[in-house]
Amino acid sequence: MKKLLLFAVVALLGLTTNAQVKLGFGVGYAIPSGDIADITDGGFSGHLELGYGITEDIDVSVFVHGDFLTGADAGLLSYDTVAFGSYMVNGRYYFKKEGFRPYGSLAIGITDIAQIEAATNGTRVAATARTSNFSFRPALGFKYGILNVNAAYLNAGEIGEGDGKATVSDFAFNVGLLFTFGGK
């Protein structure tokens, strides 16, 4: 038992000496797509991530992402800003080891879509209730030094019921910083 415990401690220390802890954040512009594009215009996108470099080519991180799409007018209704936040696990694969490093990534998790409200003739109405859905977010980008630039598509499922169902998705273009601590 002591040998097994000693082996586990040595293995853990070996992993942590080459550990690459990742800390990143970024902001960008989100363009609505799907049915949500009928009631919103573009808006702000932001994210925060904390991860681990499994190898020089592969990162895994916890990813928190938020979009705030400005409301638009649709017929007699004037929609408010639509906000949604995603809580995801993100995997990233780098195609190059040094310098300019293009990558592809995929995040999966849950997106919480806030209640959507509209106004008509000064009267406020709730168009849809708050909803949480399974979501996914593929992205293509590059990292150069600490600069992290990417374009991503977020599919956040559907909101509403019956004939009022609407798909929620967007394209986001983000610029941020991604720091690597430890490792090479």
Image (spheres, rainbow, N blue to C red):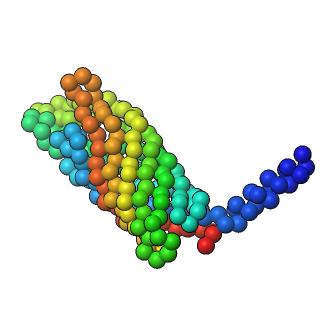
Quadrant of res 35: top left
How many marks are shown on the rendered structure? Answer: 0
Residue drawn at point x = 46 percent, y = 77 percent = 99
In this view, 170 is above or below 133:
below
In this view, 8 is above or below 115:
below
Residue 26 vs residue 33, the one in the foreground:
33
Q: Position of residue 163 (x, y in %)?
A: 20, 24
Q: Position of residue 33 (x, y in %)?
A: 23, 46
Q: Residue furthest front?
A: 95
In this view, 1 is above or below 102:
above
Residue 172 vs residue 72, the one in the foreground:
172
Residue 64 in sight in this render: no
Indicate the quadrant containing the N terminus: top left, top right, bottom left or bottom right. top right
In this view, 30 is above or below 55:
above
Residue drawn at point x = 49 percent, y = 53 percent = 91
Q: Residue furthest left?
A: 75
Quadrant of res 109: top left
In-image side of 44 versus 79 (left or right): right
Q: Residue furthest top?
A: 162
Q: Position of residue 87 (x, y in %)?
A: 46, 45
Residue drawn at point x = 20 percent, y = 49 percent = 41
In-image side of 90 versus 136 (left or right): right
Residue 161 in sight in this render: yes
Q: Position of residue 93 (x, y in %)?
A: 48, 60
